[in-house]
Image (cartoon, grey):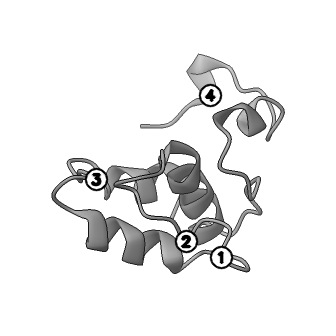
Amino acid sequence: MRPIDYMKAMIGLSEKTDTQKIRSILKTQAVNGDIDINPATTSWCSASMNYCQRAAGNKGTGSLLANSWKTYGQAVKPEDIEE
């Protein structure tokens, strides 16, 4: 599966009502606890990106900072993106 497929499976989850579910999902791809966080108290956008990348077999950034994704991967053209 592609990283986007893993992210689509998380659509609708809320840090307020699905805290334990989100935490369990993220924990499956944590390396030394790097993305094993409480989404109710820590912004989890970068953690979820790391989860999706790792679940798809990629490295991810290992950072909880959204800014860490600025230089990750390679640029693609909109017409190259498959839905």
First in sequence: mark 1 vs mark 4: 1
Return the residue nearer the eye: 32 or 28: 32
Q: Label 1 sits on what residue type?
A: Gly
Horizontal and vertical percent position of residue 54: 65, 67
Q: Which residue is mark 3?
A: 15
Q: Label 2 sits on what residue type?
A: Asp
* In-image side of 17 versus 26 (left or right): left
In the image, residue 82 above or below residue 9:
above
Farthest residue, direction left: 17
**Disc 2 + disc 1, Cβ < 8 Å:** yes
Q: Which residue is mark 4?
A: 80
Q: Quadrant of residue 18?
A: bottom left
Q: Crowding near pointer 4: few (<14 within 10 Å), some, many (20+)? A: few
Q: Crowding near pointer 3: few (<14 within 10 Å), some, many (20+)? A: some
Q: Label 4 sits on what residue type?
A: Asp
Q: Which residue is mark 2?
A: 36
Q: Give the Cα distance between marks 2 and 4.
A: 33 Å
Q: In which quadrant is the C terminus drawn?
A: top left
Question: Closer to us: mark 2 or mark 4?
Answer: 2
First in sequence: mark 4 vs mark 3: 3
**Disc 3 + disc 1, Cβ < 8 Å:** no
